[in-house]
Image (tube, rainbow, N blue to C red):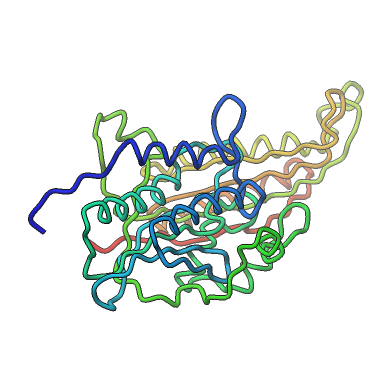
Amino acid sequence: MSHYLQINGQRLIDSLYALGEHGALPGGGVCRLAATAEDKAGRDFVVARMKALGLSVSIDAIGNVTGVYHGEETLPMVMMGSHIDTVATGGLYDGNYGVMAGLEVIATLQDAGIRTRRPLAVTFFTNEEGVRFQPDMMGSVVFAGEYPLAQALAAKDLDGITLDEALRNIGYKGERQPGDMAVDSYVELHIEQGPILDKEQIDIGVVTGVQGISWQEFTLRGVSNHAGTTPMSMRRDAGLAAAKIAVFARELALSLGGNQVATVGHFSVKPNLINVIPNHVVMSVDLRNTDNAILCLAEQQLAEFVAKTSQEEGVEITSRSLVRFNPVIFCR
């Protein structure tokens, strides 16, 4: 191809803002949790855009949506995309940028009258964020054959609704088997979710791998008593034990160094009264690392600290794994 192509940047930005209207939050941001009414509206918007470009649209059994721009030859396709579901306080670009940029590439090719040799596809994957249903990256990991479809569809949200039910409710439970299309390569444009490139004033970076992720939920059970009349030495304070775990998670990440990070993102206390010692806490710990051996070490040290804290504070602590994925190093 001898001539130079350039996308229509304003058209891309306009499409991102238009998609952002679905699930828009007052004051800015987006809440479009997977398989909700807001997600349906966003999906409908993107599918309409795919059809307007003449793409062949299909939906698989976990709700992944793919639009194909057919090539001159029947060859494995080059796939672009990302996701359009968001966290509860998401932005306009996370995931959405990769999807709408892929469609902009196809629109630019069409404007120039170009049909590529290979088919091009744009896909958005279901429940990448993992907020409503766990694990995260669900649609893509099922597509890749690394997680059972039946298990993913059986995942329940806090109201007991399964993903299968939720997808049927919004009309996005397809029949196609996830991952049954021939894909030659995959390209995803994504915003930087951290501050590193911006701080270094670097415009673009190439991702070399994906962090390993360990999400754990801890439930702590102590004894409620009066805050004024219960001596410190006689307390079984679930809130204190949980706070110790939260602080340790940060100290753990700092001590291991490198790419190790730790986050306590969910922390629910009962009875949640100012003058009552907490008797029940549910909390999460999110551990991530690009080195699986160090991630395993972090999990081990966290488990040891939790057991020690349980004994010292007289608080029963149980745990369950919500997500566990190994790191992935991309081909170079």
The percent position of residue 325, horizontal first and vertical second, equals 49, 61
Task: Farthest residue to the top: give it.
Answer: 228
Residue 230 horizontal side relative to residue 116, left or right: right
Residue at 83% in and 23% down:
274
The percent position of residue 99, horizontal first and vertical second, equals 41, 51
The answer to whether residue 192 shows anywhere in this view is yes
The percent position of residue 296, horizontal first and vertical second, equals 48, 58
Residue 106 higher or lower than 312, as above or below: below
Residue 176 horizontal side relative to residue 75, left or right: right
Q: Nearer the viewer, residue 157 or 200?
A: 157
The percent position of residue 30, horizontal first and vertical second, equals 56, 37
Residue at 43% in and 41% down:
15
Q: Nearer the viewer, residue 106 or 63?
A: 106
Residue at 39% in and 55% down:
210
Residue at 58% in and 70% down:
174
Q: Quadrant of the C terminus?
A: bottom left
Residue 106 horizontal side relative to residue 298, left or right: left
